[in-house]
Image (spheres, rainbow, N blue to C red):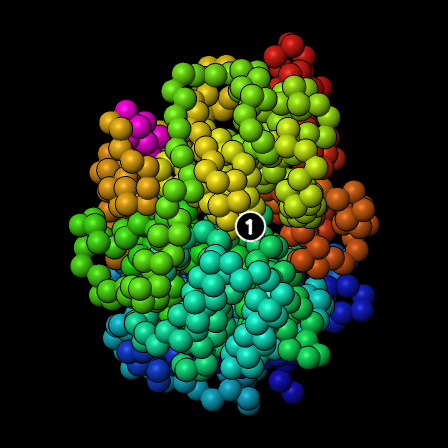
């Protein structure tokens, strides 16, 4: 009788251990299914070879689990199981595949727990990749592992052959292939241990049907509205987007604010998806707080009869990925037909080397992508590499992109970006473009106040302005502190605050309050004090705008939240300077160069307009001493770890912390929760703040932190931070 070998210990008294054959078989079948869908859209891939590379990696990825000591550990009762196996189990598969010169498969096995390495340092085929801790043991036992493997799996798995030699895949392609393995492996592990909530099969895109639903929705909006010149232009813009037949993989749209990009560009994406039989649409937004607003519109406009709204339109607020097996079910996967997420979550996934992050990437090929407010999607230093990825996805993965913004700069025309393989084309005709731009003229007056102010001076000055006033400051800390000071000047309830210090749920509540006040116009002496998260994509219209000096692009975007429909005649948008040495004014280093360039424009008497955008970015790239060239170089030599480390949209070390007390208690009680509950009721906080406030990590879900410090719906977690700052200033300490 053939011995029964194990791949996974019993998770609890109700969940038995998993056999080696069962796990290998499921990883093979699941991954082949994911890869088959990718290959429907992959251009220029040797499909047969890619499939064999995957199959060999799937078959041998857990070969080391057949070691005697590992089997003894896996056979332990559930209440005595340990976190790690005594022998690193990926090493045996690496050793075998290396001996057969199956180097691409070896790479996938090597990385399936530790992540993709820097290949320029490892050297495919030139260096021993084996773990020094396990090498001697594996050398002596590899034949035993292979004998056990053959006896376990060969009844169900046919031996796979692979021609030796290099497989011509670029780094993004390697990430996608790796995604198929990690998603299959993590998914089967979660299924076997019952740690993953049962996911229903996601609905199909059904692009033609959703396009029809969208047109009905837009027709309903226009039938109930006034026949103003603005609404007529919006209708013409929607028709232009819907009827556009450009077949380029990359298009752009320079439509100004208030033209209805949310629905018009979705019409273009759905029409494109229908023509090319695409499987998914991504809406990429610059800031997390506008996700819910956009998702709500799409859920109203695109749902078909009998569908559940969250299954059709998924909103992903944070890039919440967890390496710990118990926490993996909380990872948000891109499996809905329409995914609304942030540029941070999206591009840092494309840059990742981690299995827990990359497992979602196999859902991306064959998608249409809307980069909304594309001017703000990334820091300038990251754009050259991101532009390579965008072009590669268009040419190799059948992805179709639209880059849209009211202040879009044509960065691809700069010398720093080299020669583009795909030249973007405008999705709307010139006559429509000119009409839209003409309507925008004479709406905003840009003004500059160069003298520095502290927060008390800022609050007193704001009181003199015509309200309502929207104020955008450069950091979460400064915005919260300014809101606290201004509330004393304006009176309780006359200052609203919006930033990522609030949970997505509380941001939505605050945003609803802002919209209600703007609509009712009961009084005007109030302010919204926020961070750049309100600059883009918000359907808000204030009388006056105030922007702490940052970049030209940020200033232009704030102008889109002021006098949006020209209802105030002509409005002021101020640029102000805060005293970086005063209390609670925290500088944002990312704006050092761009704010100086903007100050130069004002000093030189330049007319502030979108026409300056490309010049501003050219100067910023050339003056910032960025690492963009090094990033492009390292990506080209498959330095996966380097790229992941250096490609950071937000350069701080944050962790996910759950704020809602009821949800925190459920986590403490070891109850099951969903990834949506985690995302809606959580914040991202720097590690040093968690340490200072002694916030505890969840025992059930490592990587999730349980907030127990001060938090309010006004200032969010900054209630605790500002109190901590005051205690430090007063000479107090937390014991």
Residue located at (29% from left, 59% from top) = 388
Give the percent coordinates (x, y) of residue 497. Answer: 63, 34
Q: Position of residue 376 (x, y in %)?
A: 41, 47
From this viewpoint, is residue 469 visible?
yes
Question: How many numbered marks have been drawn onto this rendered protein structure?
Answer: 1
Q: Residue furthest top?
A: 731
Q: Does 387 sit above or below residue 722?
A: below
Helix, strand or loop for the magenta stretch, by majority = helix
- Crowd class of label 1 (few under 14; some 14 to 19; many from 20; radius 10 Å): some
Q: Is residue 612 left or right of residue 26?
A: left
Q: For the point 35% across and 30% down, which residue is it?
A: 595
Look at the image and tell me whether residue 264 can be seen.
Answer: no
| Placement of 666 over or under 419, stated as above or below | above
Q: Nearer the viewer, residue 512 or 14?
A: 512
> Dividing the image into 4 quarters, which one contains the C terminus?
top right
Magenta run includes residue 560: no
Quarter of the N terminus within the rendering: bottom right
Whether residue 235 sits left or right of residue 434 in the image: it is right
Read off the residue under disc 1.
Answer: 539
Which element is circle 1 on?
loop
| Range drawn in magenta | 593-603
| Residue at (31% x, 67% y) in the render | 429
Is residue 714 placed above or below 618 in the rendered structure? above
Which percent across, then down, holds residue 370? 44, 62
In this view of the protein, which residue sits in the foreground, 672 or 323?
A: 672
């Amino acid at each position: 009788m053939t011995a029964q070998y194990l791949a996974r210990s019993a998770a609890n008294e109700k969940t038995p251990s998993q056999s080696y054959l069962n796990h290998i078989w499921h990883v093979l079948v699941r991954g082949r299914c994911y890869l088959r869908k990718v290959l429907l859209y992959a251009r220029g891939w040797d499909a047969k070879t890619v499939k064999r590379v995957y199959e060999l990696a799937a078959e041998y990825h857990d070969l080391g689990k057949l070691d005697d000591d590992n089997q003894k550990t896996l056979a332990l009762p559930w209440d005595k199981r340990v976190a790690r196996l005594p022998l690193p189990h990926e090493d045996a598969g690496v050793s075998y595949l290396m001996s057969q010169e199956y180097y691409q498969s070896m790479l996938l096995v090597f990385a399936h727990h530790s992540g993709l390495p820097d290949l320029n340092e490892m050297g495919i085929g030139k260096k021993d990749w084996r773990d020094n801790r396990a090498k001697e043991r594996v050398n002596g036992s590899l034949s035993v592992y292979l004998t056990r493997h053959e006896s376990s799996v060969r009844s169900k798995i046919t031996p796979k052959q692979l021609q030796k030699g290099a497989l011509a895949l670029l780094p993004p392609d390697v990430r996608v292939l790796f995604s198929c393995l990690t998603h299959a492996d993590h998914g089967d592990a979660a299924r076997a241990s019952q740690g993953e909530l049962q996911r229903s099969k996601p609905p199909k895109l059904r692009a033609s049907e959703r396009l029809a639903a969208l047109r009905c929705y837009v027709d309903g909006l226009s039938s109930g509205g006034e026949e103003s010149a603005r609404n007529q232009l919006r209708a013409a813009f929607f028709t232009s987007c819907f009827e556009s037949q450009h077949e380029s993989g990359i298009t752009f749209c320079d439509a100004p604010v208030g033209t209805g990009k949310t629905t018009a560009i979705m019409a273009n994406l759905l029409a494109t998806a229908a023509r090319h039989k695409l499987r998914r649409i991504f809406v990429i937004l610059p800031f997390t707080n506008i996700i819910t607003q956009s998702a709500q519109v799409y859920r109203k406009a695109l749902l078909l009869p009998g569908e559940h709204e969250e299954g059709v339109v998924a909103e992903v607020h944070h890039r919440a990925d967890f390496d710990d097996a118990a926490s993996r079910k909380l990872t948000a996967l891109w499996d809905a037909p329409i995914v609304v997420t942030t540029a941070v979550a999206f591009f840092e996934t494309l840059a990742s080397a981690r299995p827990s992050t990359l497992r979602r990437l196999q859902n991306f090929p064959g998608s249409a992508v809307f980069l909304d407010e594309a001017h703000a999607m990334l820091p300038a230093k990251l754009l050259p590499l991101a532009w390579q990825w965008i072009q590669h996805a268009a040419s190799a993965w059948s992805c179709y992109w639209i880059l849209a913004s009211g202040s879009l700069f044509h960065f691809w025309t700069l010398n720093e970006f080299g020669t583009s393989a795909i030249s973007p084309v405008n999705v709307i005709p010139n006559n429509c473009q000119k009409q839209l731009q003409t309507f925008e003229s004479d709406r905003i007056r840009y003004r500059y106040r160069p003298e520095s102010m502290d927060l008390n001076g800022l609050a007193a000055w704001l009181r003199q302005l015509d309200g309502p006033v929207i104020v955008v400051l450069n950091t979460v800390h400064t915005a919260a502190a300014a809101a606290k000071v201004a509330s004393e000047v304006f009176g309780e309830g006359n200052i609203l605050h919006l930033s990522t210090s609030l949970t997505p749920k509380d941001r939505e509540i605050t945003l609803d309050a802002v919209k209600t006040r703007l609509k009712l116009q009961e009084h005007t002496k109030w302010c919204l004090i926020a961070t750049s998260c309100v600059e883009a994509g918000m359907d808000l219209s204030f009388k006056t705008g105030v922007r702490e000096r940052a970049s030209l692009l940020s200033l232009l975007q704030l102008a889109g939240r002021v006098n949006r429909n020209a209802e105030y005649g002509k409005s002021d948008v101020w640029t102000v300077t805060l005293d970086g040495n005063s209390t609670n004014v925290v500088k944002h280093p990312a704006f050092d160069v761009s704010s100086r360039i903007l100050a130069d424009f004002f000093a030189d008497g330049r007319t502030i307009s979108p026409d300056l955008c490309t010049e501003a970015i050219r100067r910023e790239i050339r003056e910032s001493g960025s690492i963009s060239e090094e990033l492009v170089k390292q990506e080209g030599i498959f330095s996966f770890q380097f790229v992941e480390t250096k490609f950071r949209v937000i350069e701080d070390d944050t962790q996910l912390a759950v704020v809602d007390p009821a949800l925190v208690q459920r986590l403490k009680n070891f109850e099951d929760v969903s990834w949506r509950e985690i995302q809606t009721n959580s914040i991202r906080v720097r590690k040093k703040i968690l340490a200072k406030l002694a916030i505890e990590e969840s025992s059930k879900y490592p990587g999730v932190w349980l907030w127990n410090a001060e938090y309010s719906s006004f200032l969010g977690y900054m209630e605790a931070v500002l109190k901590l700052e005051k205690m430090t200033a007063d000479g107090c300490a937390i014991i």
